[in-house]
Amino acid sequence: MPPVLSRYATLVFDCDGVVLDSNRTKTEAFRTAALPYGPDAADALVAHHIAHGGVSRYAKFAHFLAQIVPAHATVSDGPGLDALLDSYSQATRIGLINCVAAEGLEALRTATMGMRWLIVSGGDQAELRRIFAARGLAGLFDGGIFGSPDTKDEILAREIAAGTIQKPALFMGDSRYDHAAAKLAGLDFVFINGWTEVHDWPDFVACADLTTVAGVADLLSPTLVMGTA
């Protein structure tokens, strides 16, 4: 087992930008769904989405309708929440099936056979489970695949209370929210930077004193040292 992981009982993975290279797919899906309200509103939603990486689509579209549409829309009538969610889901479906999966997942699973693996994502839970099953990845995550409409904070608290997540545990994410959720739950954290949409991530990880790697395969390195944050 890689020395840096030997202390952990549970590994928790975000999905987008960590297990799947799907961040760009989802960003463009937000833009596509919002375009009926005009390009300015769509651009504002994309900016909000990137600034709040890891937050569920439900919360982002609710914010879009409540805050962005009144300020930026160029039309007076457009799709409601359910229609926006449906448009977004349709736009992401093919991309999630076809996007690249992280290198080294199978090797990491083999090296950590004594640990429980979970997905804790901002993506829709039912959709995640379908995608992971279709791609043959579901079997890697023996602790379960979890997502919205529950928040990551809610999922982590619930699964810790249920004993599914046993500490010490490590969360691997690519957003500020991932780090905040891990910290609130008392989990160690590694920032995965290879596919992140956090543009200033080097400053972020330096200020927070985080361990960062390009991808999950780098956790197999015998020389990797875990930070204290």
Image (cartoon, rainbow, N blue to C red):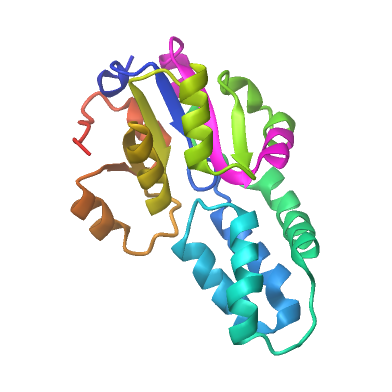
Res 164 visible: no
Image position of 141 with respect to 24: above or below: above
Q: Residue at x 37, y 64 (%)?
A: 199
Image position of 80 with respect to 181: above or below: below
Q: Quadrant of the C terminus?
A: top left
Q: Residue at x 21, y 27 (%)?
A: 223
Instruction: Pick whichever, 82 or 101, lies toward us.
Output: 82
Residue interval drawn in magenta: 106-130
Q: Where residue 190 sits in the image (x, y, percent)?
A: 33, 38
Image position of 121 with respect to 32: above or below: above
Q: Where residue 72 sits in the image (x, y, percent)?
A: 61, 85
Return the residue found at the far bottom. Answer: 74
Residue 110 part of the magenta-drawn span: yes
Q: Where residue 176 sits in the image (x, y, percent)?
A: 38, 53
Instruction: Pick whichever, 134 or 84, lies toward us.
Output: 84
Q: Where residue 16 sits in the image (x, y, percent)?
A: 54, 47
Residue 23: quadrant of the picture: bottom right
